[in-house]
Image (cartoon, rainbow, N blue to C red):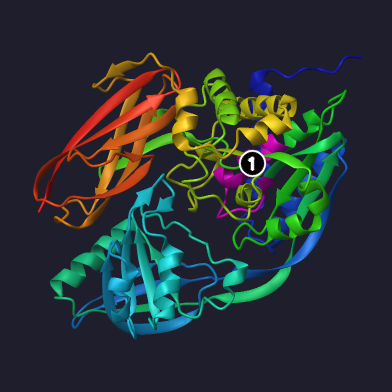
Amino acid sequence: MAAQVMTEKELGDKLYQTMTDLVSFGYRYPGSDAEKKAAQYILKDLKKGGLDVVYEPYEARCYRYTRQVVRAIGVEQTYEFTSHPVWLSKGGKATAPIYHAGLAIEPVENWIHQVKGKIVFMESKQFMTVFPTQLVNHIYRAVEDAGAVGFVAWIDIPCGMRGRYDEIHEEHYTYGKIPGAVICREDGMMVNEAFKDWNGEMTLEIDGDGEVFIDGSGDIFGIIPGNEHVLAVQTHYDSTHGGAVDNAAANAAWMHILKELAKLEGDHPTIMICGNSGHENCIGARHFMERHKDFINRTYACINFDGLAAIGYSWSERGVIPTGRDDLRFVHTSDNPMLLKMVCEKLEKYQMLPANYAPLSTSIANEDLEGMFYDLEIPTLLVIGKPIWYHTDHDTQDKVEPEQIYRSMMGHYEMILEILKMDPQQLRKNDRLAHEEVVNQLVPKTKTETEECHSNMGYTFNIIPPVPKAGERIYMYQTSVVHDPGVIIDTVWDFGDDSPVGRGQFTNHTYETSGKKTLTVKLYDNNGNVATYKREFWVK
């Protein structure tokens, strides 16, 4: 009897159900019962699909907390705010005068000497919908070294959400000795107003628990046999909060694709199955890389599954609305036009737009995931969407639709099939090219230019500080994109003062004179469309 072929809707519903099953286990931090249940669920499913996979245990430093609050204390009034702790930071109570670091965009050495004995309070905007403009944990470690007794960051994301930032890795074991807290946008604004109203005479208090402990976690490893060349197909199965987008949707697609790849016949590269935990302290992949050096030494490419699909949302002070599109995706490749061209074709074919090219040479590669392969100079690929709910307790299954998972799964499946056909030597030869060389190979010579927003084109960006001073470094970064005609390959910033242009999703510049300035941003896509956006602002 012939096997029954599922319709697109049936397969989308099945992938959605797998995602929902993983989310139902709860917050899957390394070492937790929920993470262990997720690992066993994945192993059982892959084995049922005919794959020879194993669970490779290791010990991990884990973190548990049940409460944390931040208090702003004045002479006559106290405000209290709930918070998330900086991962692995100390529990207990710390009370001290405030050091208000603002946006912390000045070089750290200019102000770090003033933080000793104080609790540092820092504002951070959002870049690429998930990364803070000022890296929370980097500042945390800097102020801890300088003698601060605590650290509070307020993060500019909507709806009272408090993002989780967990870049304190295993090698930073000497850190985490002071309480660290992340509060939401609305609470941060209130602290800011109180600071001004009380003329800076404010005491901050961080009060909560936090326990670091050792527990078992593990990686999922397997091989789909092939020739001497190895393709790594990787994902992380732990999560921050419920983790539908990060990373249960990607896990569902990864599992389905691996079972399809197991049916391949004929000569093809070996496929290495990499399912890593320990995402929150960057340990799982390090164990994996150490254990499987024989395969990694033969790996000619790596494709990562993370942030696979999500509903697109736009937000402002007036609220949050769905865009009617997928969430913006970032195409991270190792400056490789062979990979980028192929990915653009699949993104357009399966309508996985809008999408931006963000080369791994300029973006933030997770050292526990694709970053480890990238650091070994292995051609690397990740297509990831990061909605505003990413790394918050709003990352629930209603933020993803079945047909989105289906389209994304199909796009990734065909990417893998194309990579399996690529010549490993040619792939390496085309890797780590200069940005201009990659762009010139992808952007057509003939271009269609527009200076108007359309229903399928739109772009916004932020400037911090919003009213800078002459001689002060300012930062410009993309905040939202609608661009359906193709994949954005290059973003060029013209500062309007005859200085060299900036490139990419973020840039910085210093204006030497005051006055009204005009900033012009041009987006170039793979189909030759050029969209121009302008903005005027003042420099004091």
Residue at horizontal 33%, vertical 74%?
120
Task: Classify 278 as above or below 225.
Answer: below
The amino acid at mark 1 is Asn
Task: Name the residue tied to disc 1.
Answer: 304
Task: Give the position of the N terminus as an image quadrant.
Answer: top right
Residue at horizontal 25%, vertical 47%?
463
Task: Give the position of the C terminus as an image quadrant.
Answer: bottom left
Query: Is 195 placed left or right of 448 in the picture?
Result: left
Residue at horizontal 40%, vertical 68%?
139
x%, y% of residue 156? Answer: 33, 54
x%, y% of residue 357? Answer: 47, 34
Query: Is 316 placed left or right of 165 in the picture?
Result: left
Counting other residues with Cα less than 10 Å from the Cα at mark 1, is it few (<14), some (14-19), or many (20 or more)? many
User: Is residue 58 among the parts visible in the rendering?
Assistant: yes
Nearest the camera: 118 or 433? 433
x%, y% of residue 375? Answer: 62, 51
Quarter residue 50 falls in? top right
For residue 265: magenta?
Answer: no
Query: Is 378 placed left or right of 458 in the picture?
Result: right
Task: Classify 66 as above or below 495.
Answer: below
Q: Which residues are magenta?
A: 235-254
